[in-house]
Image: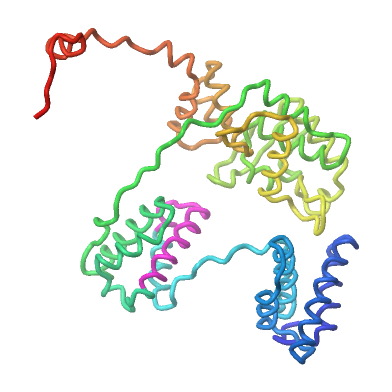
Amino acid sequence: MTQKTAPFNELMEGVLNQLKSMGYMDSTLTVYSRTYARVQAFLAQCGTNIYTPEIGVSFLTNTNAKKSTSVAYACAIRRLNDFIDGKSFRSHHDCPHVQAPPEFSCVLVKYLQECMKSGNKSATLQSKERTCGLFLAFLKGDGCTDLSQMDAGMVSRSLLTFSNRDRYAVVRQFLRFLADKGVTKTDLSGIVPHYRRRKPLPTTYTPEEITRIEAAVDICTDTGKRNLAIIRLATRMGLRSGDIARLKLAEIDFSTGHININQEKTGIPLSIQMPSDVSDALAAHIENDARSSVDGYVFHCMVAPYGRISTSIIRHAVNESFTVAKVNTVGKKHGPHAFRSSLASSMVNDGAPYEVVRRILGHSNPNVIKHYAKADIENLRRCSIDPPAPTGRFGDYLSGKEVVSRV
């Protein structure tokens, strides 16, 4: 169905049947039906029975409801709009990012192609595309219709719109590219400030705290069996949440006890031995998840549309375990990556060579592992050196023998 308008009864029935075919529960369908009844009443007030996306926007604008209800209404409207536009079903609607103006799209494509040739991964290219899209959109709004007209003032004003100063480096690189290719007469990259984000100490939890977190999972339920397998993959093997979400049955070899994956972040193959408690947790989960044999993925959502699990669901499951275990997380990160850093710090602190830790965690840069050694306070204390005794005028000043006056 690709028409832009439709009688509402026909449209509502089509959306509800689509949701029903995706496995949504009757209680959820009832909530959607009630929302659509309100939309239908709004249409009657407008003197029509034909729904359009514009009417959907008007409905949301004129609805006086609390935030949670407004979010549900917005989701129901998006499903109507997707259906009449002929779009495939989407479990989640991602926030759209700003597109580069059409007149600048060609040069952006050339820049991204050069970044790809330099070895940038897909996630990095997407991030650069979003940043440059915002930058180019601002330039157009600031009156720049040709990049050769760009000046330092435009660049400076655009930088003020970025709340995340990590984007500065991308803008600087893009401006240098424009100058190298002759798109701009002057290299404006030099006016972009250099910003280096301070690297905080890695968040770590003790083995005792991690044991409490694992014990807090209720393995009497299918959801609990799934969550325990997820948590142990993070705590015992240090897998990233993205790799856990994408894990497939074919990548698990129970006969040899290995997991073999291509890491989502780096693209580097990783083969790692499973501890017995990880293997047992995975086996218990897979036995209760028949959907794994359908699409090949190990972990799935427990509610409709029952697709492959997302990293946001993994974060929610981990956060819930922290809460149930009553582990103190004040001032500390408490997502899946905290387990990864805890494992790395524990191995470094136990004397494991950096190269061994690097291979287990799948890092491509050997220097990254040294970051985890910062949390080993006791061993760092042993390396401390007493400062030399103060002498000369400085010693006199500290002892009070001499007063230094400032003019």
Q: Nearer the viewer, residue 69 or 36?
A: 69
Toward which corner of the image does residue 234 lie, by quadrant?
A: top right
Specify whether 196 is left or right of 57: left
Q: Is residue 149 left or right of residue 341?
A: left
Q: x and y percent of residue 112 in the render?
A: 43, 62
Q: Quadrant of residue 385?
A: top left
Q: Is residue 68 above or below residue 245?
A: below
Q: Which residue is at a point 31% across and 48% down the rendered structure image?
A: 194
Vertically, is 231 above or below 388?
below
Q: Is residue 119 magenta?
A: yes
Residue 376 picture location, percent across and down? 49, 20
User: Residue 348: image x %, image y %?
Assistant: 52, 21
Question: Looking at the image, which residue sits at the far right?
Answer: 26
Q: Residue furthest left?
A: 407
Image quarter hosting the N terminus: bottom right
Q: Which residues are magenta?
A: 115-139
Q: Is residue 55 left or right of residue 126?
A: right
Q: Residue at x 68, y 74 (%)?
A: 60
Q: Residue 128's spot in the image, x, y percent? A: 44, 58
> Please, which residue is most extreme toward the bottom here?
47
**Which residue appears at 59% of the width and 47% of the height?**
264
In the image: residue 100, left or right of residue 27: left
Look at the image and name its color scheme.
rainbow
Q: Nearer the viewer, residue 327 or 360?
A: 327
Question: How many labels, in total?
Answer: 0
| Residue at image location 70% in from the left, 71% down from the top | 64
| 110 and 145: which is toward the camera | 145
| Type of secondary structure dominating the magenta stretch | helix
Q: Quadrant of the C terminus?
A: top left
Residue 222 covered by magenta stretch: no
